[in-house]
Image (cartoon, grey):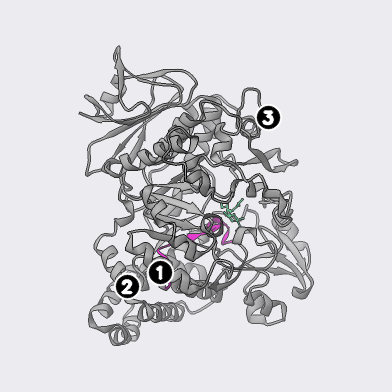
Amino acid sequence: MPSSGPDLAAPPGDLVAAIGPAARDRLGRLEGEAFLARLERVHPDVAGPLHTLYGARTDVAALVRELVGAALDAAAARPERLRVLDRRREVDPAWFQDSRTIGYACYTDRFAGTLAGVRTRLDYLAELGVTYLHLMPLLAPREGPDDGGYAVADYTSVDPRLGTMADLEDLTADLHGRGIALCVDLVLNHTAREHEWARRAAAGDPAYRDFYLVFPDRTMPDAYERTLPEVFPDTAPGSFTHVPEMGGWVWTTFNDYQWDLDYTNPAVFGAMLRTMLELANHGVDVLRLDAAPFLWKRLGTDCQNQPEAHLLVQAFRGLTRLAAPGLLFKAEAIVAPEMLVQYLGAHETYRPECDLAYHNQLMVLLWSSLATRDATLATRALSRLRPEPPSTGWITYLRCHDDIGWAVSDTDAAAVGWNGYEHRRFLAAYYAGRHPGSTARGALFQENEATGDARTSGMAATLAGFAAGDPAAVDRLETLYSVVFSFGGIPLLWMGDELALGDDPHWADDPEHAADNRWMHRPPMDWAAAARRHDPETVEGRVFGRIRALATARRGLPALRSGGSTVLLEPDDPHVLAYRRQHPRSGPLVALANFSDGWQSVDLGLLAAAGVAAPAHVHSTRGRLDLGEGRAHLPPWGFAWIATA
Ligand code: OTU
């Protein structure tokens, strides 16, 4: 870890002298003092990282003054309705950790046409108990292919097809009125090449050229590429694009129209901070930091998860908290298991970073357990993960808009006697329906001839067997989601999973999408199917009822809230995933999930050792607990949540 510089524990007197009167003057005495108290609190988390990142290049004290000034401007401009929310959240910083927090993720257009349309669908979300809505990228993208909105041309306006900034504000007001927080993507690793910064750079403005990473010839790109993996080997090979107007090779980790920003330049940091502050002031509650692992490049590495990427996020967090103390950060870091919890601030010592992070390992291991009918790898790998800091939480999920990358580590595979490479290949083949006995009907994504690596596309329903008419599919989907809802953290439903919505059969009709089969699992919402959700005779009715029941049961279970602990248990039956959830405010809860086509059982001694000596039914597939012969019995693909009587 780079050192965090000299003793920067308290804000230096000259900073307080410079900011203090202005803060009191512009924010009033109460708010001004609160701002200064926050400054005292976050200063080490801001100045330390900035010193390491920029100390060699610039006067860090002056940089901190400038950035704190930007935060003060944002604080002064913050609408009162958002300050009220901030107040509540400072009183209750654990607000997002509540077991009542339930998430839903969707594309605005595919769910409801426009932002105004989303406001007409809030009753539907309320039925599922949703309190956290993630709308996929909604800022103005480039024209033409835009990687699902991840190529932003203007951070200050909304995609005109979806509405305006005023519509976004109106939506957040409605959401807040219903106790729903809004999460929006912030694509901070790159901009579209049509963004004004990039246009100015291409026009020769040196200040903006310094926003991007440009190399005159192939020497450095070749040197970097020796250790750089390719994100989209099929459609966007390599990580550099030759751009004549830029006079060389521009760093483009993803598509050629997505130019990586150069975070060694403090001006880039400042520009992105202002973007964050503005989004917060429009009413956004959670920023999903897209591609966070990629923010810092280092020769000879894979240019992911560099220590500086963490320092950047830490500094952003401290500074945004000054103006918008209710704002949360969510890390999108789809990385190896041992790299994951650092995004929640778990370094050698805790350093506030993101409040939330996707639990990519859990997601991968759930699908792995389904394919192998065996939970031992999941048990092993999940018990090896370092626990998340208690003030943070995981986002637990089964599917999202991206492909599934088979992040099973060789170490974990070897620990259960499997070959990691072979297992990853098996999973890709299984979910593409290329394995005998598989009823999954997904597709391979970005098969890499060179490495043998392949990822998977497809909706949860497709992967769980609905498309092949597998009669076990309903129970499977429910049991997978039972883990998502009980593992600890915020469960995040991917739009349509609550209805077992299948893939978009027309995904390839759009020529801009035809080369990217992630569009399979980004279907439009099927509101006709949703209309059948209360009819138990239909598939939609069965699935919706079970997902809603999981949400309802979860809400009343403080053991499931974030900030508690999850301990993997080792049942004597390899088909069963078992864990104990506990929170200081509650007794333990044991969750069991059967990943097999037959009845399975676990010894009640396992439950007793986990603190559940007199097992009582909380929620399960069959609505009761099947006990007998000293064991808890689970039907095929069944689950049970058990507490002490
Ligand atoms: C993210 O994904 C988004 O989720 C994708 O939809 C975008 O295409 C991409 O960024 C570019 O903006 O590599 O295969 O560790 O896994 O950032 C998808 C994080 C990706 C990466 C993730 C990236």
Report x, y in % for residue 85. Answer: 30, 67
Q: Nearer the viewer, mark 3 or mark 2?
A: 2
Report x, y in % for residue 380. Answer: 46, 31
Name the foreground residue: 596 vs 208. 596
Q: Can I make out residue 205 in this image?
A: yes
Residue at left 46%, top 76%? Answer: 60
Q: Judge from the rendering whether residue 580 lies leftward or rightward of residue 320; answer left or right.
A: left
Q: Can I make out residue 347 in this image?
A: no
Quadrant housing residue 541: top left
Report x, y in % for residue 212. Answer: 65, 70
Residue at left 45%, top 36%? Answer: 543
Report x, y in % for residue 507. Answer: 67, 49
Of mark 2 and mark 1, the one earlier in the sequence is 2
Please give the label number shown on residue 81.
2
Q: Is mark 3 within 8 Å of ligand 1?
A: no
Name the foreground residue: 556 vs 2. 556
- Mark 3–mark 2 Cα distance, whole angstroms, equals 54 Å
Mark 1, other Cα within 10 Å: few <14 / some 14–19 / many ≥20: many
Q: Secondary structure at mark 3?
A: loop
Q: Which residue is mark 3?
A: 434
* In this view, 107 is above or below 405: below
Q: Which residues are magenta?
A: 282-296
Asked if the residue under mark 1 is in contact with the one under mark 2, i.e. CB atoms within 8 Å, the reply is yes
Q: Which residue is mark 1?
A: 283
Please give the label number shown on residue 147.
none
Q: How many marks?
A: 3
